[in-house]
Amino acid sequence: MYPAPRRGGSLEAAPSRDLAGQLNKSTYVMIEDNKENEDNAPERGRTAIIFSLKNEVGGLVKALKLFQEKHVNLVHIESRKSKRRNSEFEIFVDCDSNREQLNEIFQLLKSHVNVVSVSPTEHFNDHEDDLAVTAIAILESSVSSLSVLGFINNLVDSMRSLDMENVPWFPKKISDLDKCANRVLMYGSDLDADHPGFKDNVYRKRRKYFADLAMNYKHGDPIPKIEFTEEEIKTWGTVYRELNNLYPTHACREYLKNLPLLTKYCGYREDNIPQLEDVSRFLKERTGFTIRPVAGYLSPRDFLAGLAFRVFHCTQYVRHSSDPLYTPEPDTCHELLGHVPLLAEPSFAQFSQEIGLASLGASDEAVQKLATSLACASKRDNYEFMGLACFLRLVSSREFAKTIKRPFGVKYNPYTQSVQILKDTKSIASVVNELRHELDIVSDALSKMGKQLEV
């Protein structure tokens, strides 16, 4: 069956009289023979092909006839004006064929047309690392195939001109956080002279204890349970009580929704400092976030890298008791009362991870801007909880993240807890095929809902 070209999304479909024309001889892409499958029955699969035609009479008919002669079923056809030459049009063909048929088509097309790109979308991906392929997802009627193609073509072209060697190191899997979680910039077990606890030897010894626990922690370990001192619990209680008086008028709706849950499941009380392991389990069930103990203040790059994997670096030590409502550094009061309630909110957790992913491999300037958007917790004369202003600032940073220039894209894989680097056509094709599968699930659900409504 050979459907007529139709308009695709926002791209203009060319009139049939414009598409008719002599076939333009130019460069072509060859698909190598799969020697291993010569003795086997041909395996069929979906393949997307794009070729260009001059705006002359008869060309499209001749091109489509080649497919007909080789008994290749055309599932979908679209057209658009060429972005390479104003005198040509590009034809998108989604066909159902086996490898032998596909090679024969190319043998015929190579002497007549300019094959812009090819993407074997199913089955034919085993020996194509060296092919000049473009990832095409056949997203049925919900997404314009040419729109997807145009976006990916532009993305791949820009990637090829950039240098991966100049990209700063970043973790590729969640266990890689072991390599950067201990790069504490300040405080930790050493305190500056202006720190409230600098002259308190007992406090400094206690801080070293917490620092050692964090430094020895590895991904997958249970977070050590802490027996907090009476003084530490009293300091926590002062902060907790003061903030609870302010929540009704200062905390955002999302914060107020999640705080009672933390009280119920994690022991948030005035007379009890929650254990990080309990908080981590709670967040894991709510939003997929987990807690990782840290000895002190991390660089913005290392802190945001954790968010990319839905990991929140959290201190376990308590601020000095001489000034309970002030801390020059993040402490467990700041972390548990400032950040955690919103990390239990799915939308906020998603925003946070997106900012983290945007930071991977980004420039120092871009990382600093992303970190500034998240730096809404306490300064010296403010109380420690993220409110609506921070939430809106995070939305703004999401827009900024789209403008960051990197020679690749990233996608988080929640199954392997790793980051997929999208830097070539093969990696992009994999993601697009995943998207196609997700759309199939949504389409199936909508179909079932429709049938129920009909009943």
Image: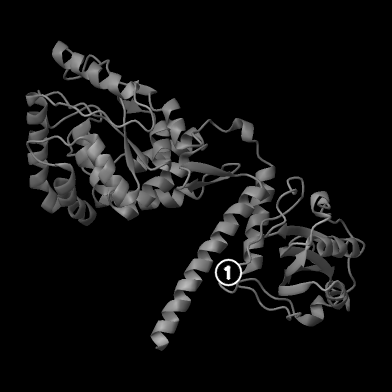
Q: Residue at x 24, y 16 (%)?
A: 208
Q: Quadrant of residue 383?
A: top left
Image spot of residue 156 (x, y percent): 67, 50
Reply above or below: 210 against 417. Answer: above
Dot 1 amino acid type: Val
Badge 1 element: loop
Colour scheme shown: one colour
- Give the left or right position of residue 345, taking residue 63 as reference: left
Q: In the orientation shown, which residue stands out farthest toward the right? A: 111
In the depicted view, which residue is nearer to us: 34 or 107?
Answer: 34
Position of residue 349 measured from the top left corner of the image (x, y, whole percent) = 34, 49
Give neighbour class at mark 1: few <14, some 14-19, many 20+ (Cα, 10 Å): some
- 182 displayed left or right of 324: right
Q: Is residue 354 visible in the rendered structure shown here?
A: yes
Q: Position of residue 92 (x, y in %)?
A: 73, 68
In which quarter of the view is residue 216 placed? top left
Q: Quadrant of residue 191?
A: top left
Seen at 46% across and 43% down, the residue is: 357
Q: Which residue is mark 1?
A: 143
